[in-house]
């Protein structure tokens, strides 16, 4: 017996959509491994079965124990290349030869049914995942396929689209595809949110206007969004030049989890949200007028991965997902308690503090140093902006800012 494991795509559900080559392999296998619904299709073969649930570690041990002794086939819904167990097995069973046999995915099936091409579709799964990047995904792609499941139901998706200003997109939902009770419905997010669908459904979200992506407020890849693009009130805002330097010091990744403490108008949160497309930003603020401005700006820039958190740090932070980047723009006199809380993190984090007052800068430097933060960097940034006086330009200085960064 060879050291091979077969991963076989069995299509959307109906046995008629399984390729003949896949059927032959399944019939020749000693053990079938898969979800209960997939295994039920082959009960007549009376094969040994291993049911996949929340037991992946146990499944892995079983495979390693019997590889080379039994011919095993993993039954993957749809196509193994689309959000299946195959990636997990590839990373875990490094000494096993994996032979993958394609299947018809529910994506292909749905697009064929509604006569849509899928060569320009962005594919995302919300099964067991948060909706934090949904708005960014939809805004940046004319067609998006979403595999729903778990807490991220079609209702949650539709409500998120509406609240993010994307209520005019078109949503198509396919339920129990290829089965006799198959249902495919198209409508607006508001209309679709009122209907009931199976939790494991597939959604196609399309922009109006022949699938062209909605124009963004800021389409550039560089930071430093012009100040005038933000909704502003009487709340202080980090100016664009300072913002650009502070963001460079944060060294963000696409999947960073960021806290913006003392978020003000939310300008730092917005910039971070545009960069951490696969991450999450928590804009922490206690003042009511500032909170209203942050929410307006989040809606204006259409960022679903920026969450507004009302309260005082560090108390309000305890129940949030742990960050790997923290920006401190205001502490309300609680610098020490915030740094105490940050110092207790058991993973690597990077902190950037913006300070206008010399005393605040000194407090931040001493606090970071005494708590074991390393690579403390201090930059004094002074910016002057040109303004027209008569027919000539004069430079007008802005308040100098101290930008302190460090890691733990």
Image: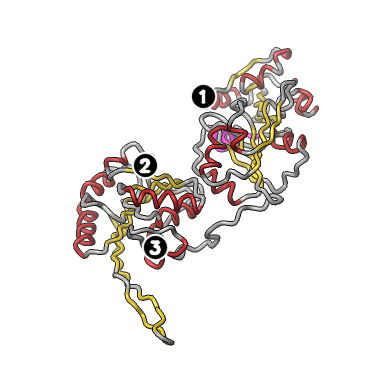
How packed is label 1: few (under 14 Cα within 10 Å), some, or many (20 or more)? few
Residue closer to the observer: 371 or 351:
351
Q: Which residue is mark 2?
A: 322
Q: Which residue is mark 3?
A: 243
Asked if 328 appears above or below 23 in the picture, the reply is below
Q: Which mark is residue 175?
A: none
Spatial CA span between label 2 and label 3: 23 Å
Q: Is residue 294 visible?
A: yes
Residue closer to the observer: 71 or 122:
122
Tell me whether circle 1 and circle 3 mark residues in contact (CB < 8 Å).
no
Residue range (magenta): 88-98
Asked if 111 appears above or below 299 in the picture, the reply is above
Q: Is residue 90 magenta?
A: yes
Q: Position of residue 114 (x, y in %)?
A: 76, 37
Q: Position of residue 90 (x, y in %)?
A: 59, 37
For mark 3, give the secondary structure. helix
Asked if 224 appears above or below 110 in the picture, the reply is below
Mark nearer the viewer, 1 or 3? 3
How packed is label 3: few (under 14 Cα within 10 Å), some, or many (20 or more)? some
Q: Which residue is mark 1?
A: 54
Residue at 37% across, 42% down: 322
Q: Position of residue 283 (x, y in %)?
A: 38, 48
Quadrant of the snapshot with the N terminus: top right
* Horizontal side, residue 253 vs residue 339: left or right: right
For mark 1, give the secondary structure. loop
């Amino acid at each position: 017996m060879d050291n091979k494991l077969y991963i076989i795509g069995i299509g959307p559900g109906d046995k008629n959509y399984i390729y003949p080559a896949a059927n032959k392999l399944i019939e020749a296998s000693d053990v079938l491994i898969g979800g209960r619904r997939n295994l039920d299709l082959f009960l007549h073969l009376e094969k040994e079965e291993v049911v996949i649930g929340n037991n992946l570690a146990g499944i892995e041990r079983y495979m390693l124990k019997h590889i080379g002794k039994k011919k095993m086939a993993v039954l993957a819904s749809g196509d193994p290349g689309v959000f299946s167990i195959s990636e997990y097995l590839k990373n875990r069973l490094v000494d096993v030869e994996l032979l993958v046999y394609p299947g018809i995915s529910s994506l292909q099936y749905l697009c064929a049914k509604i006569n849509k091409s899928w060569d320009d579709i962005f594919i995302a799964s919300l099964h067991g995942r948060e909706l934090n990047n949904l708005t960014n995904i939809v805004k940046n792609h004319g067609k998006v396929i979403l595999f729903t499941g778990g807490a991220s139901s079609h209702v949650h998706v539709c409500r998120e689209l509406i609240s993010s200003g994307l209520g005019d997109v078109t949503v198509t939902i396919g339920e129990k595809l290829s089965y006799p009770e198959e249902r495919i419905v198209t409508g607006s997010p508001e209309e679709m949110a009122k209907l009931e669908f199976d939790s494991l459904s597939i959604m196609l979200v399309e922009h109006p206007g022949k699938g062209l992506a909605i124009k963004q407020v800021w389409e550039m890849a560089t930071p430093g969004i012009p100040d005038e693009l933000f909704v502003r009130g009487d709340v202080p805002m980090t100016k664009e030049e300072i913002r650009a330097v502070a963001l460079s010091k944060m060294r963000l990744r696409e999947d960073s989890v960021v806290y913006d403490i003392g978020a003000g108008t939310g300008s730092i949160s917005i910039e971070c949200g545009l960069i951490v497309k696969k991450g999450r930003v928590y804009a922490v603020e206690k003042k009511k007028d500032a909170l209203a401005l942050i929410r307006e700006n989040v809606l204006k820039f259409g960022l679903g991965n920026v969450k507004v958190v009302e309260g005082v740090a560090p108390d309000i932070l305890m129940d949030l997902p742990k960050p790997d980047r923290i920006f401190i723009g205001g502490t309300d006199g609680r610098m020490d308690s915030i740094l105490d809380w940050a110092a207790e993190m058991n993973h690597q984090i990077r902190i950037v503090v913006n300070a206008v007052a010399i005393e605040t800068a000194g407090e931040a430097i001493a606090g970071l140093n005494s708590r074991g933060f390393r690579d403390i960097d201090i930059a004094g940034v002074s910016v002057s902006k040109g303004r027209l006086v008569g027919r000539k330009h004069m430079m007008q200085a802005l308040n100098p800012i101290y930008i302190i960064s460090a890691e733990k």
